[in-house]
Each structure stands twice: as C-alpha cells, then as structure tokens.
Image: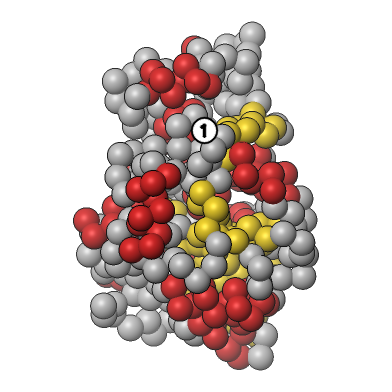
C-alpha cells in the first residue's frame, strides 16, 4: 500500500517525493528543536492579532464566534470539519454545525479527505457510510480526493515544494476551518493547523508525504519536530491558496488526548471544557488554545500537557511563526463581557470538571 502511494506520487529519496524536496540538490533538511518547550507570552515578540472567545458551548456560541471573523468569506465556501469515525463521541455536535450553516453559510459544503490509515473513512465508499452513520446528512459533504488529487505550491518550505491535496479543493473560493481542538497521537494537539494540514492532504499521496519516509516499513515513522514541520507546510499550501478568504474557529470541548480519528477508542476526557475561539490568524488561535491549556490548574491540564510535550507538538506553533503564517501574540476578546480584553488565565478560570 505504501509503495503504491509513493509510486503514484513519483516519490523518491529525501522523504518528500521526486521533484518535491524544497532542498533538492542540497543536503537533507534538518528539523527544528524545542517542540517540547512552552514559551510564555511575555517571552514572545512581534505584532498582536485578535482572537475572540466565548464560554458559550452551544450552537449560539458557535454562531457568535464565527460571525466575528466571517467578513472575508464569500463565494463557494468549503467548511473543513473533522466528521469523525463511526459513533465518535467527541466531535463537534452536528446540531451546532447545522445551525451555523443554516444561519451564516447557506450553500456551504463540508469538505473532507479519505484517511491514510485503514478505518471507517479509508475509502470513499466507507467514508460515505460513516458520514451517514454520524448524521452528516443535512448538507453536501465533498470527499475532495474521491476522484483525484492535485498539487499546490508550498511557498518557503524546507521539506516540500508542493503538497498533494484532494482535487476538489480547487472548486472553492473560501475556507472555514471549523476545528475540534483536542490532543493528538502524533501532533501532540490538534488545532486548526492539524485540521487543514492533515485534513486537506489527500489520503494516499499527501498524507504519505507528511507521515512516512519512502521505503519505511513503519507507516508513521516521521514524528516530533519533523512531523510538525511537514504538517505545517501542508497547511501553508492550503491557506496560501485561499489568501484572505480563510478563517478559523476552534471548539475547546470534549478534549481527549486522542484525535477524533480514534473514534470510540479515544482516551477518556479528563480536561475541562472551555469554550469557543475564533480568529483570522491561524497561529494566534492555536496559540491561544494552547495558552489556555497551560493556564489551567495542574490537575486540569496534566494529561494534555503531557501529550503536547511528549510529542514535541509545540513545534507547530514556532514553525508557523517562522513561516510567517501569523502571530503568536494576540488580544483575547471576551464576547461574553462586552468585548473586554482578557488573558488566557482569565479564560481558564473557574472551569468545571469534565462531565460527559
């Protein structure tokens, strides 16, 4: 299976694919470091972006958060959403998504790609059955790599010159990243960066470029900082394609240390629910979510921090900044209190223990 995927991509040495290494003709790229080290806000430099925050975990809260950052979304709209394995317990509630689309995004399409692992969404037929089982039947769902793939450029990357994505990505004029923020087995955490970087890469070629060294018997042999950088370069290809017509909403609810890819096998949730964030800056929104996790009490955040640091997942944030994808400093605007600016610590204050 892996050999076939790389053969289809024309893949060669260097872990990227023939003609796809950003450093072709030069020595092999070297991954960054310190993906297991959290950088406090006061040690960061640069401009500040705006991130909106509400504690209202409901359809109304989702709508409120999205409407703060919807100004550039127009035309044919793709909503990138993790629709989950069959009966996955932690995905964003369908009713919330339906309400958002009906009010603010009529005519929008949920977009997905097939998975790289063999599971409920590995083939288009299986994926369609899973979508139906999980209730994603109230609007069109486009499995973007169902028919073919296409490559789009990675500007300024060191691992890739291009990324392979589902062909149908090119049908859309705007992208809304509607993300369930949680832990992740490989990435440490899954925010907007993971939702786009893995979620728009096609299931056989793009995901293989990110996850696997050609010739390796281990499908998941690329990890830690190198994996974070490859995933982030994939994200950059997609958001550069959409330009200003992309926006981000992160839902901090049912935050298992496991990705929604693990479905009913996900680790039990022990981290408190927080709220919903939105921004036009992908780095700022993922950074704000991570900052809120770190601002929790030791008991509340122990599991998530262990997952993020043990996987060196914080490299996602530093590499997004290196690539110029956004700012890691931000103004956090409290939508529940008249637009007051608050800190991550204030957003994490007085959280209730998680209850299913």
Q: Residue at x 30, y 59 (%)?
A: 86
Q: Quadrant of residue 87?
A: bottom left
Q: Residue at x 39, y 68 (%)?
A: 135
Q: Inspect this view and state whether residue 302 appears.
A: no
Q: Quadrant of residue 335?
A: bottom right
Q: Position of residue 285 (x, y in %)?
A: 58, 62
Q: Position of residue 89 (x, y in %)?
A: 30, 67
Q: Nearer the viewer, residue 37 or 148?
A: 148
Q: Position of residue 281 (x, y in %)?
A: 67, 59
When the figure is inspected, residue 324 is found, relative to residue 139, above or below; the finding is above
Q: Position of residue 354 (x, y in %)?
A: 29, 77
Which quadrant holds the C terminus? bottom left
Mark 1: which secondary structure? helix
Tell me the crowding category of disc 1: few under 14, some 14 to 19, or many 20 or more residues within 10 angstroms, Cα based: many
Q: Give left or right: position of 113 versus 127.
A: right
When the figure is inspected, residue 295 is found, relative to residue 189, above or below; the finding is below
Q: Give left or right: position of 32 versus 92.
A: right
Q: Residue at x 76, y 64 (%)?
A: 74
Q: Quadrant of residue 103?
A: bottom right
Q: Determine which residue is flagged by label 1.
A: 206
When the figure is inspected, residue 343 is found, relative to residue 150, above or below; the finding is below
Q: Nearer the viewer, residue 37 or 66?
A: 66
Q: Inspect this view and state whether residue 20 appears.
A: yes
Q: Nearer the viewer, residue 45 or 21?
A: 21
Which quadrant holds the N terminus? top left
Q: Residue at x 39, y 34 (%)?
A: 223
């Amino acid at each position: 299976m892996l050999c076939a995927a790389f053969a289809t991509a024309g893949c060669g040495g260097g872990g990227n694919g023939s003609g796809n290494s950003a450093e072709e003709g030069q020595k092999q790229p070297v991954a960054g470091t310190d993906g297991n080290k959290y950088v406090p806000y006061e040690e960061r430099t640069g401009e500040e972006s705006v991130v909106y925050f509400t504690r209202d975990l409901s359809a109304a809260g989702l709508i409120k958060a999205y409407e703060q950052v919807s100004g550039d979304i127009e035309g044919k709209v793709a909503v990138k959403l993790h629709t989950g394995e069959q009966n996955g317990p932690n995905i964003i509630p369908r009713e919330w998504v339906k309400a958002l689309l009906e009010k603010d995004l009529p005519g929008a399409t949920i977009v997905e790609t097939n998975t790289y692992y063999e599971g409920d969404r590995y083939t288009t037929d299986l994926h369609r059955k899973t979508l139906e089982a999980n209730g994603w039947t109230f609007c069109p769902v486009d499995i973007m790599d169902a028919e073919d793939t296409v490559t789009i450029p990675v500007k300024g990357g060191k691992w890739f010159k291009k990324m392979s994505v589902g062909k149908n990505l090119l049908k859309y004029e705007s992208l809304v990243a509607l993300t369930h923020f949680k832990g992740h087995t490989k990435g440490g955490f899954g925010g907007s960066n993971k939702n786009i970087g893995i979620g728009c890469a096609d299931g056989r070629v793009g995901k293989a470029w990110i996850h696997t060294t050609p010739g390796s018997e281990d499908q998941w042999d690329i990890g830690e900082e190198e994996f974070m950088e490859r995933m982030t370069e994939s994200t950059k290809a997609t958001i550069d394609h959409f330009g200003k017509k992309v926006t981000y909403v992160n839902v901090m609810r049912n935050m298992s240390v496991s990705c929604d890819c693990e479905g009913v096998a996900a680790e039990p949730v022990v981290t408190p629910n927080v709220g919903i964030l939105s921004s036009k800056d992908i780095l700022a929104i993922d950074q704000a979510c991570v900052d809120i996790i770190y601002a929790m009490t030791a008991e509340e955040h122990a599991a998530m921090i262990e997952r993020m640091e043990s996987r060196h997942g914080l490299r996602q944030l530093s590499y997004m900044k290196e690539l110029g994808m956004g700012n890691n400093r931000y103004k956090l605007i409290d939508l529940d209190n008249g637009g007051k600016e608050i800190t991550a610590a204030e957003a994490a204050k007085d959280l209730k223990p998680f209850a299913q």
